[in-house]
Image (cartoon, grey):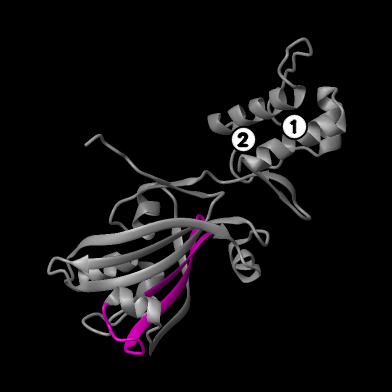
Amino acid sequence: MTGPEIAVDRSSPVPLYFQVAEQFAAAIQRGELAPGDRLDSELQLADRLGLSRPTVRQAIQHLVDKGLIVRRRGVGTQVVRSEVRRAVELTSLHDDLVRAGQQPSTSVLELAAVACPATAAQALGVPAGAEVQHLRRLRFADGEPLAVMENWLPLDPVRLTLDALQSRGLYALLRAAGLRIRTAHQRIGARAATAAEAQMLGERRGAPLLTMTRTAYDDQGRHVEHGAHIYRAARYALEVTVAER
């Protein structure tokens, strides 16, 4: 592809690489460059724009750092899909993706009855080692990996199945079973991806991840589920509205 028309002003105090990067960013925001579109190579861009390769390389790196494009070995430089923005509400990621116009899909990595680990047991209000349902899922948005979600739930009153978890969000399944989820305690953090996590999420080892732990309760104050989730920071953001007291 040739890409958008880029004009640089050599008399401007704005660095040339920044002028190029900002015009590419604007083209992405306008939809002129769509997710998956490939940019010309550094050599092609440098020749087309009459700039040096180091200047073009710096512009490309700036766009990579902003999470707008990604370098893929054997493919080239591509525009990434838009960031998933999620309000901090008592909803499931599956339903939030549907509302945002993205197609969610799920790979269930584990679903089993297990002895509850101490941290999850404390959150669920059960003795450590008590038998609970444990599930681990890899969630995709429009076919691209976005999050790894791990949850622990009491054995009753809902027994989850692979088929149900691959087609619907966890909270939708719980509500369909008659559970009225009313409140949750949630903690947001960040850390670097392990090698295994990076491989699952299509990231490099050490890439930044957003973390979220959540314990949900029903309208009687009983524990419904405890989750520990990780999200690609380049593709996912949490939004919070604050008000003065």
Residue 56: quadrant of the picture: top right
| Mark 1, other Cα within 10 Å: few <14 / some 14–19 / many ≥20 | few
User: What amino acid is at disc 1?
Assistant: Thr
Residue 177: quadrant of the picture: bottom left
In front here: 187 or 137? Answer: 187
Tell whether 240 sits left or right of 146: left
Tell whether 141 sits left or right of 54: left
Residue 238 picture location, percent across and down? 41, 48
In front here: 210 or 167? Answer: 210
Residue 206 picture location, percent across and down? 65, 60
- Residue placed at 22% from the left, 60% from the top? 183
- Residue placed at 75% from the left, 52% from the top? 75
Name, please, the residue furthest toward the front: 245
Query: Mark 1 sits on what residue?
Result: 2
Rounded to the nearest whole Å, what is the CA distance between mark 1 and mark 2?
Answer: 11 Å
Is residue 143 visible to the viewer in this orientation of the structure?
no
Which region of the structure is painted magenta? 125-151
Asked if the magenta segment contains residue 82, the reply would be no
Tell whether 164 sits left or right of 245: right
> In this picture, is 147 found above or below 50?
below
- Residue placed at 35% from the left, 83% from the top? 133
User: What amino acid is at disc 2?
Assistant: Leu
In front here: 245 or 157? Answer: 245
Residue 59 picture location, percent across and down? 74, 33
- Residue placed at 78% from the left, 55% from the top? 74
Q: Main secondary structure of the magenta part?
A: strand
Q: Earlier in the sequence, mark 1 or mark 2?
A: 1
Residue 166 picture location, percent across and down? 41, 71
Query: Mark 2 sits on what residue?
Result: 33
